[in-house]
Each structure stands twice: as structure tokens, then as C-alpha cells.
Image: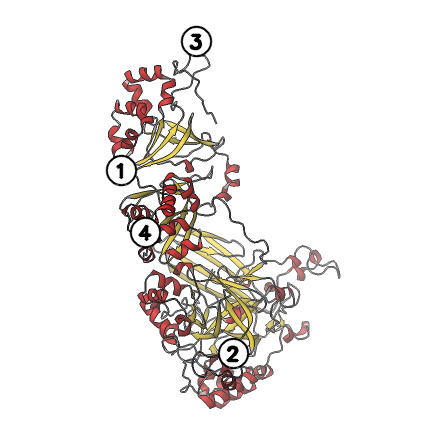
Amino acid sequence: MARRFRPSSPLVVLAAVALLAGSVTCFEVPEPEVYDDTESATLGVAGLPGARVQDRESLESDVETISDELTHRNPDERRPLHRQPLVPSRPVGHPDAETIDGPAHQPQRPPFDTSSLFQHHFNTFFNTPLETGFFGSGLPGGFGGFFDLHANRPWWKGENVCTEREEKEEDIAADDNQEVAVNGGTGAGVFGFSSFNLNVESCAEKQHKYVCTSIKNVNGRKRTEKITRQCCHGYGRPRNGPPNAHCEKMDLHSMEDTAERLGAKEFIATLKKSGLEATLENEVTLFVVPDSAYTTFAEQMWENNLVAFDPSARAKRAIDFASMTARDVILGHTVNGSYHIEDISNEQLLKTELPGANIRINIYPRGPAAMAREHAEHPYRYTANCAPLVKLNRVTERGIVHVVDRVLVPARNTLMDIIEGRDDMTLMRTFLEMTGLDKMLREQGDDKHFTVFAPNDEAFLKLDKDIRRKLKAGNGCAQNILKNHILDITFCSLAAVNGVKTSTYNMLNEKLEFEYAMVGKKLPSSGTENPIEAMEEDPSVGKKSQRLRINGQALIEESDVVASNGVLHVIDSVLPTESGMPISNTLANHNLTIFKQLIADAGLEDEFDGMSNKTFFIPSDQAFEQTETGRYWIRQLKEHPESLRNSAELKEFLEYHVVEPLIKTCELEEKTMPTKAGQSVRVNLYTTNPVFTTVMNRATVNCARLTHFDEETCGSVVHEIDKVLDVPKMNLLETLRSNADYSMFLRLVSETNLTELLASEDSGLTLLVPKNDVFLEVNAWYQETLENKEELERIIRAHILPNVICCTGIVPSEWPFVRTTETIGQHQLKLNRNRRPQVQNAGITKCDVVARNGIIHEINDVINVQPQRSASGSAGNSGPFPNFGRPLTFWFK
């Protein structure tokens, strides 16, 4: 029979909505922790889940737009509007170009892709800007708006706009209840498509295009139609113009001329020498390199046969470019099709003309100060293979040119390939292979992108020998230590803004903070020990420079080693994490000193530290001080510590707090769980929400409440509890027999046929037991009830609940949200708390006496479940218990 908490009258809908906010987290924390109010404000880092940026100064501008390409607005130069397909912007066969007929189309993001967290990748809620509303944008120069039809007409309905249409039709599996999320625009929502014929439409406006998507489901087939309206080739909208500025003619140049105007003459010269002049006549996206960066690259390539952008920091990269020709370099910067930067999503891979080489585009926000200044209209920074894009969207007669600040590294090798090829990462390679994480770092694909902060061998040698041993063993500790260094996003060094703190979360969902610091370069640990000789070999030794620091501890020695599935940064220290530390460290860090000392004095520290896939329920020090069992073990620690070594009793006590497997609070269920000591503990879940009674936000184990939880340790998890767990030795019936104060209630139970129920090991009951002094006050009624077997069994059944309800699960409740629970006799008992827990008319005077098959609550009254006396009853009738020597307390709330 399931426990039920329900209102005693119909729920009020408005009250239900008002109280919904109380059930946000999985479990409530009894006392909220106090955080430092001086912590500076933060800003989300685009594309990085949970990332934040503190509000300080940012870097200066590194992006130029196309606004200066707009020429004088001459009405005579406007072209007539032709509703024809746009000039193809992707090659035929491009995986993202799906059309009904004709050539491929403008590159598009997949419909409803929410992989990017940036403003220009989301649809606007309103399709008409505020400035072009009823009054238009003509005020105050004239009446405008209402009288200016042209001002009120959206730009995408104006002249020089071309329209592109894409359609796609696919089957819907009969057992697949698909959902389509429509983000932003009009008609936004989530709709199921398995059982309804729906027509969902959504429109979104960007700076340079207006896209409407219609999704229909007819007879089990889903049809998607996308209509894109944008300025025809040769026309554009000024970025800094009015919000509803129409498409205007642009002064376009050839790709060669545009690239040279952008300062990439050497790049174009190499392109021509390599016999790739035809590329300039095709529709391509070209990532060109400024002359200064390209000249430096060319010199180093001739001298060293290595691509090294910064000899002091990147010369160690194990990437051999000896077989790479100048032609290969140009092809590695060339992408077939026109790609406007705002049409590219974060983490998108662009296939270059160099076989096996892709360009990964990443998007990061500027610092808050820069966003508030001149870059308010373009608050993002873009990278191609982690190299910053310094000039964007330069439209040419045939394609688009972007300027990148250095020659792009061809990302052909996976992260694991790079680690295996480096001489300074032998330990990292070994640990990854032992834990099986090497397979993850070999994965490739559009959705495979990782960042590895890889400690070099010197960093691992700084670790304690025991931790290195655990890493080599490849157990849970090793996995957690390594996952602390891995992100499931691409985090280029450009993501960290100079002058602010940037944060993101790793694969353990633990925060990593990045900030620049002025530090000096250290002497090498091997080679010459003479500082003067070291400075002669490397002038940067001893000089301070800005370097990126992680969590205030590890410095990035080498950044942005680009791979086909992400990026690698070499760091000088292993990043510590509690989830990679043994249980003894976690107990010390959280001030659970008594339990830790008991483990040490019992000689079980190594055994507990070696445990994996376990759940630890650890009593706080205060819990030891407040319980009889806890005080006993405190006395043993102080008076007889030598007797605790190899103590079987202490070992059983400690292991009774350890459960297998690892279970976090959001995965807890109401059930019994076996402990390492052999006996089971019972987990119960409760709700404190008076309306949404199915939302559980409070948990107990053997009626000990979880007060702090989900603290990860080496392959396990720690939950702090407010009581010491005693190993129960008796069942409910045996517990009644062992306490003389329960003898009169035990006699009533013995007269019924319920003794077997109380002795059953699988029952899981709550027993409400009045002590003898309660029955002595109504002794005449007690003796009379003994003679009435039917009444006796009814009364005893009213004191037995078919499930475990701990005192912590009884919370205050007011009308109309009065909680009730049902007894095994089908009686409804009211639950409330007013200074003490209350069940119906009785107050609980002693909570949570734990037995093997349930719990006992001592109460100060006999539970009254008989019908209440009617108003028309005889005045001489003294009620259902006429012989009680004292009045009963009734609760009508």
C-alpha cells in the first residue's frame, strides 16, 4: 500500500502555480551556505556551458565589417527585384545543402540547431524591429511611420532581395515520437509529431537574411520547407545603418584585389605561383594571412621545414611539415562555397581543398567593457583552428574573404595522435591508455570536439607516489584526475579575455577558471644548471610575460595545439580535484574528523581509500556528539584508542555507512540498499512542497537526513547525514518486547493476529506506539478493549502504517494542503508539525527507533479514528472513549 500525501479539499490552481518554484533542485539543503558578496559580477562565455566572465576591461577591436563597402545611395542604381534562386553558395553535394532541384544553395545551419549559445544563432522573438513600428523610423524628420509606407516595409520585402527555397521530406517511424524544437521567431514551441497533423511555422531575422521554416506532418511524412530571403549578390545592408535599412549596391572587387587590399599580397603571390589562379575565379571562401605573418611563416618553413608560429612556445610541436608544399598551404586555407561568418555555427567544420584537412570555427564573446563600447554591434570573436579572425565577411565578386592572423595549422591528427607523438607526454599517454580515455580522444566527427589540458611528464612527477600509482592502475581515481583536464568543447586560448576571469566546466562538471598573469619563464629542469648560460640559450628565461593560468595553479606552457577533434594545451602542473582524491582527503577537507579518525585508528584507511563505486553516508561531527552511539565512539577515541585497532565491532559500524554502488541524490529511490557490513539501510524520499507532492526534495537513510550531498571522491560519492547509523539487531516485534515501556501495547498486539506482520523481515512498516503511561490514564477503556477483539484489531491497525515515514518527512501543512497517510486498516491519518511531529491527534515524543523491518515512533495518545460526535448527539454521551480519564487532543487542521 503506497503512502499518499494529499489535500483534504480541492486544490486551488493559482496557489499551485505560485508554489511551483519550490521544487527546482533534486534535494533541499537544510541550511543555505553563505557566499562571499564581494565576488565580482560575471558574464556568460558564449559556446562554453556554464562559463562566466567577470566584468573588467576587455581586449581592443580585432574585427572590421563591410559597412565601408557601401557606396552612395543612388535610386537609379537599384536593380529590379527578381524572384529567382540565389547564386549557389555551396558546392553540389555539400552535406548541408538539400534542395528540390537546381544547384546547391547558400550555406545554412541545420534547422533548429541549438548547439551555439550566441545571440546571432538564435531567432528574434519579434520579426519587425521596434524602430519600424507604427511611427516608423522617419521621426523626428517628418511624420514618417504611419504615413511612410516604405519606412514600414521590412527590408526583406524591399528591392534587391533574392529568394531561395529548400524542401525536404522524410518518413517518421511509427514508434518514434519525434519532437521538433522551434527556436525564436514566430510560432516558437515544441510539438510532438507522432499523432497529430501539425503545421508549424517559424521566421527569424538576421543582419543579412530572413528565414522562414514550415514543418508539416501529413500521413506519417514530415515535410520541411525553408524560404530564405537575403540581399542579392552585389548588394548588402549597412551594419551601422537604420534597423530597417534596405539592400543597397556594394562596390565589389575581385577576390585577388580584395585580398591585396586587406594586406595579403604575399599569400596571393604564393597562390599564383602554385598554379591556383583559377581558384580566384571560383566561388570560394578564402582565409588569407597578412603579409607579416605569412613572411615569418615562409622563412621558418624554409629554414626548419617546420610550421612554427612562435619559436619560443611552439617549436616542440611534433607535427612534421617537411612534405607540405606551398600549394598545400594555400589549399588548406580554401573552402568551396561562400560562407558568411554569421551563417557558421560554433564548432562547425569547414572542409578545405586540402584532402583530410578541415577548418574548425569557434565563437567567443568579447569582454563586457568591449561589448559596451565600439563592438556592441558585433560582440563576438571568431577563430579558425584557434587562430583569431581579424577581418570578416569581405564580399568579393565571386566569394568571401576572411583574414586570419597566422597561417592555419592543418588539423589532420587526433588529440591522441598528438599526445603519442610528443616526447614530453609519455606519462599522459600511459595514463590515458590505462583508463580507456584514449579511445575517446581518437574519436572524430562533426560532433566530436574536446579540449585537453595535458600535464607534461615533469608535472606528473611532482605528484605524490600514491596518486601516480592510482593513475597507473587506471581505476576511478585515475579517470577522475584525467577528466578534470578534459572539456567537451573547443577552448582556444582566445576564449580567455585579458583582464577578466573566464570560467567553464570540465567533464566532471567542475569549474575551471582562467586568467592572465605576469610570470617569468622558469629555468629548464634538465640541461644546463647555469642561469647565465640558460639565458644565453633562451633570452626569454627569467623575463616576465603574460601567461594563462588555470584555477590559480597551473600555467599553460604551450597553447592551441590544434587537432582534428579539438585542441590541446600543455600545462606545467596537474590540476587537483577532490573527485580524484581518496576518501580520507575528502573527509578531512569537509571537516568530518571523527569518522576519519575512527577509520585511521581501526587500521582501515588503506582499505577505505581503495574503495571504488561506493556511496558513503558520513555522519557529521555534530551528529556524533548528539547521539548515544556517537558519544560512545568519541569516548573510545579519547580513552581507549589502542582498543580500536582491528576491532570487529568498529569495522561493522564503519562499513554500515558504506553502500554499493555509487548513487547521487538525483538517482536515489525508495528502497533498501545492502551495505558493506552485510545489513541493509533503507532510503526514503519526501517532499516539502505542499502542492507538488510527487516532487521529492528531501532524503533520509535509516531516518538520518542528508544535509550535504554529492561530494565526489575517488570513484565514489559522499553524502553527509545528521545522525549516526546504528546497525539494527531486532525486528519490530523484538523491539517491542525489549522495551518495558511498550508492554501494554505489546499485549494488545499479541491479542490480535498481527504479530507475524511485525516479525516479517520484508514489511517496511511504521509503528505508532503509545507508552504504558498513556494506557494507564485510560485503564478502564484498555481493559474493555481487550475483551472486544474486533475493536481491538481495528485500533491496532490504525497504529500501523504500511511504509516508513521518518520524522523528517513530516512537515508543517495548512489547509487546504493537509497531508494524510493511510494505515493498514484503511484509515486516513493527518500529518502535521507544530513544534513536534503530529499524527492525527497524537504528538510524537520520540522519533525514529530503527528496526530491521521498519521504525517505531513513540506517541503521547491513542490514535482516534472513530467518527466524530455529531451535533445532535445526546448531551450525556461522553464520546467514543467514555471512560478516558483525561480529554483527548484532536487536530482539525
Q: Mark 3 is on which residue type? A: Gly
Q: Mark 4 is on which residue type? A: Ala
Give the percent coordinates (x, y) of residue 224. Answer: 44, 60
Q: Which mark is residue 762?
A: 1
Q: Which residue is mark 4?
A: 602
Q: Earlier in the sequence, mark 4 or mark 2?
A: 2
Marks 2/3: CA–CA distance: 101 Å
Marks 4/3: CA–CA distance: 68 Å
Q: Which residue is mark 2?
A: 287
Q: Is residue 248 left or right of residue 784?
A: right
Q: Mark 1 is on which residue type? A: Asp
Q: Secondary structure at mark 4?
A: loop
| Mark 3 and mark 1 residues within 8 Å of each other at the beta carbon | no
State the count of labels.
4
Marks 4/1: CA–CA distance: 33 Å
Q: Which residue is mark 3?
A: 876
- Return the residue nearer the eye: 761 or 802: 761
Q: Secondary structure at mark 3?
A: loop
- Rate crowding at label 3 as few (under 14), some (14 to 19) or many (20 or more) other CA atoms within 10 Å: few
| Mark 1 and mark 2 residues within 8 Å of each other at the beta carbon | no
